[in-house]
Structure formats: C-alpha cells, structure tokens
Image: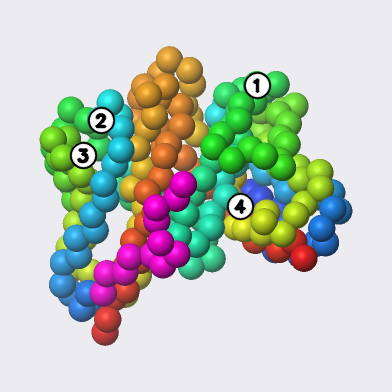
Amino acid sequence: GESVGLHLPTLSVQEGDNSIINCAYSNSASDYFIWYKQESGKGPQFIIDIRSNMDKRQGQRVTVLLNKTVKHLSLQIAATQPGDSAVYFCAERDDYGQNFVFGPGTRLSVLP
Amino acid sequence: EAQVTQNPRYLITVTGKKLTVTCSQNMNHEYMSWYRQDPGLGLRQIYYSMNVEVTDKGDVPEGYKVSRKEKRNFPLILESPSPNQTSLYFCASSLFTPGDRGNYGYTFGSGTRLTVV
C-alpha cells in the first residue's frame, strides 16, 4: 500500500538563497529522469532532464545531480526567487521507455 | 502555441452520472496519457495510448475508460462516477514512439478538478 503521508514535504528558503530538492527513485534500470515544476492551478512543466549516463546537467539557474549508486536525484536552484515557489516532482522512465513514474513531490516556499 | 487542452477545468457531478473529460493536443504526438493527482499520492497513471486505437491500462484504471479514435483527442470517460474519483486529473502527450528511447518528456494540460458528490 501507499507509504507516503498525506502532507507534502516542504522546503522553505529565503529569497536569494540556493535551494536543494531531493528525490529517491526506485528503478535502478531507469535510463532517463525529469524534474517537473507545478505551480498552483497549473499542470506540471518540464524543468530539466538527465540521462543515466550522466552525473550532472546544468540549465539556467538549475542543476540536476544523479547518484545511481544510491538511486538519488537532486535539483539545485540557484538564487531562488519568489516565482520558484511551487511543487517539484522528479520522474523516472520505466523499463519499457514509455511511461514515467512520479515521485510524491516537494513544496518549495520562498520567503521574502 | 503547442499545447494540451483539457475541458472542463472544473466539474461537480453526482454519483452515477456519466461524464467525459476531453483532452486534445496540437503537436501531432502519438503518445497520450491520463493521470490523477491526489494529496500525498502524487501523480498516478490511469490509462495511456501509444497511437490511434491503441490504449493500455496504467496503475489505477478501475472505474475509467478511454478512447483514441483520432491522434489529437484522448477523452477520459467515467461511466458511473463515485466519490473516490474526486481528484485533479491531467492529460499529457509526448513525442515518444515505441522503440525510441530519446529524451522525451510529457507536455501536460492545465488539469480538470472533478468533484463527485
């Protein structure tokens, strides 16, 4: 059955600080991962992706790190802004390469 | 603008009254999928479709039907809605095609908030 609690993990950071959001994934054979951002009242939006043959990938203000040894993903947001307040999901692609499994999400709150 | 369009955005209905949530994409994607989102449970896949007339069950298909008669449309049908189907529903599409393990993510619609009383 489900082991996730009813409340989303929440990360509160001061505006201008760096944010780190973590995610544990389950399938060691997964070859592709994506981070999505979901703002209130909207659908999830693609932020950044990484393939399993990479350890790190950088975008504009965002960096994704992949640690395959411990099946861990992290999303780093530099100089966090109020517009970064949202729920962030990691997603891993399944063995067949056709569907994604989503993590439970982390709510990021940016304090003024 | 490339997008996935869902309708309606909000719907309140009564138990047992059949309803359809529409989903349309203008990106010529072959792959489409429906998810439901519940507090603490994240996004769970209901059904997906690889192409026209090809649909498969996801993780939580009970109580739902889908059809894919045209590439652009993928409606979600609740024949006899029940209160446990109260949820936030998302349609998504992707460039993905079978056998291609390229870097393809999902484009999501804006969501349909369904309440069954």
Label 1 residue SS: strand
Nearest to viewer (mark 3 / mark 1) = 3
The residues bearing labels 1 and 4 have C-alpha atoms spaced at a distance of: 21 Å
Whether pointer 1 and pointer 4 mark residues with C-beta atoms closer than 8 Å, the reply is no
The residues bearing labels 4 and 2 have C-alpha atoms spaced at a distance of: 29 Å
> Which residue occupies 81% across, 44% down?
B79
Callout 2: chain: A
Query: What's drawn in magenta, residue-wise?
Result: A1-12
Label 3 residue SS: loop
Classified by dominant secondary structure, the portion drawn in magenta counts as loop
Instruction: Decide: few, some or many residues near mark 3? Use Cα within 10 Å; few <14, some 14-19, many ≥20.
Output: some
The residues bearing labels 3 and 4 have C-alpha atoms spaced at a distance of: 29 Å
Q: Quadrant of residue A79?
A: bottom left
Q: Which residue is mark 1?
A: B54
On residue A71, the disc is: 3
Label 4 residue SS: strand
The residues bearing labels 3 and 1 have C-alpha atoms spaced at a distance of: 33 Å
